């Protein structure tokens, strides 16, 4: 009997200490949530919200939710509904519906003891992941690291790898993935715990050392869409960021084209 009791105690300790709710970890500007038809309420850091809750961000406002070990950043002018949060033995399942706007997510990868399923359904397509970082607006997908399966309502799908961009067009096609930047490092790992999530919200910007050049601009989904979504012609020539930037400033070309030129050449 003693060995049986010890066995069940070990199993209990191996289950992640997450609840089947989402938690506001960061709130900036006007962020509201509505739970199952109730009134809209202002979001506050630390507030837990259950399945069925809608989250809405206003102009120049954003928020971050911790969900079963993963983190979802909700961008300005976005509305998201939490459809499913399920934590069972060995499985963590999250389903979100993106009604409008854009989200960025850092999804905890699956491990030997926990299988992670994370899906974001948009008006045109669904992004399904098993531990990765990505940005998604319901149609356009930019994968920061890992792998995401992008599928539309016609069951057409493509696998998009870290550093690649793809788009699910309304005509039923999904564009071939295009490499637009180097893949980033995974920030939430399979073996890591809550300390990795906490670290995402504890980082403070450091002051630049006098005389050092500013860090290079990072891609985001809106920049990639402005280049590939509008089928812009990538400018040829130029071998450095500064050279290309100056050339395109002379003809008033958006900086997003500069970034794409440097990466794609």
Image (cartoon, helix red, strand yellow):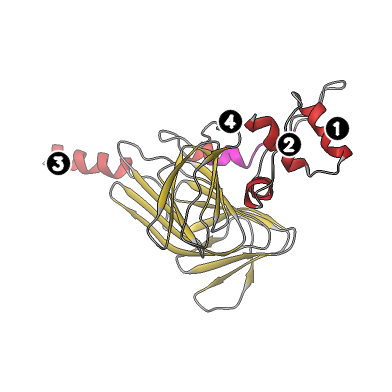
Q: Position of residue 204 (x, y in %)?
A: 71, 36
- Nearer the observer, 3 or 245: 245
- Element at label 3: helix
User: Is label 4 or label 3 in front?
Assistant: 4
Q: Is residue 154 left or right of residue 4?
A: right
Q: Name the residue under label 2.
A: 235
For marks 1 and 3, give the CA distance: 72 Å
Q: Does the magenta stretch include residue 20?
A: no
For marks 4 and 2, give the CA distance: 20 Å
User: Is label 1 or label 3 in front?
Assistant: 1
- Element at label 4: loop
For marks 4 and 3, give the CA distance: 50 Å
Q: Residue 182 carries which label?
A: 4
Q: Position of residue 51 (x, y in %)?
A: 45, 65
Q: Position of residue 153 (x, y in %)?
A: 42, 63
Residue at the image position 40 percent from the left and 44 percent from the top = 130
Asked if the residues shown at circle 2 and circle 3 are in contact, with their CB atoms under 8 angstroms apart, the answer is: no
Asked if the residues shown at circle 4 and circle 3 are in contact, with their CB atoms under 8 angstroms apart, the answer is: no
Which of the marked residues, 4 or 1, is nearer the chain's N terminus? 4
Q: Residue 232 carries which label?
A: none
- Element at label 2: loop
**Which residues are drawn in magenta?**
197-205
Judge the density around disc 2: few (<14), some (14-19), many (≥20) Cα neighbours within 10 Å: some
Q: Is residue 183 left or right of residue 218?
A: left
- Nearer the observer, 135 or 38: 135
Q: Which mark is residue 246?
A: 1
Q: Quadrant of the N terminus?
A: top left
For marks 1 and 2, give the CA distance: 12 Å
Asked if the residues shown at circle 4 and circle 1 are in contact, with their CB atoms under 8 angstroms apart, the answer is: no
For marks 4 and 1, give the CA distance: 23 Å
Residue at the image position 62 percent from the left and 74 percent from the top = 40
């Amino acid at each position: 009997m003693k060995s049986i009791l010890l066995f069940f105690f070990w199993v209990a300790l191996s289950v992640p200490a997450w609840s089947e709710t989402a938690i506001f970890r960061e709130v900036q500007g006007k962020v509201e949530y509505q739970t199952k038809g109730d009134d809209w309420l202002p979001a506050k850091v630390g507030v837990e919200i259950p399945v069925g809750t809608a989250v809405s961000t206003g102009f120049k406002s954003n928020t971050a939710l911790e969900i079963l070990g993963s983190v979802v950043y909700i961008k300005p002018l976005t509305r998201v509904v939490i459809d499913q949060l399920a934590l069972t033995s060995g499985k963590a399942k999250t389903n979100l519906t993106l009604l409008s706007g854009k989200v960025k997510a850092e999804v905890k990868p699956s491990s030997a003891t926990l299988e992670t399923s994370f899906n974001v359904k948009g008006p045109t397509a669904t992004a399904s992941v098993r531990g990765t970082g990505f940005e998604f607006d319901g149609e356009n997908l930019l994968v920061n690291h890992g792998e995401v399966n992008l599928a539309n309502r016609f069951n057409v799908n493509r696998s998009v790898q870290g550093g690649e961009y793809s788009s699910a067009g309304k005509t039923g096609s999904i564009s071939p993935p295009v490499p637009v930047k180097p893949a980033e490092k995974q920030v939430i790992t399979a073996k890591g715990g809550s300390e990795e999530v906490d670290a995402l919200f504890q980082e403070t910007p450091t002051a630049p050392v006098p005389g050092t050049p500013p860090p290079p601009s990072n891609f985001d989904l809106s920049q990639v869409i402005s280049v590939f979504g509008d089928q812009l012609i990538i400018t040829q020539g130029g071998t450095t960021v500064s050279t290309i930037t100056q050339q395109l400033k002379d003809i008033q070309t958006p900086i997003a084209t500069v970034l794409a030129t440097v990466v794609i050449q």
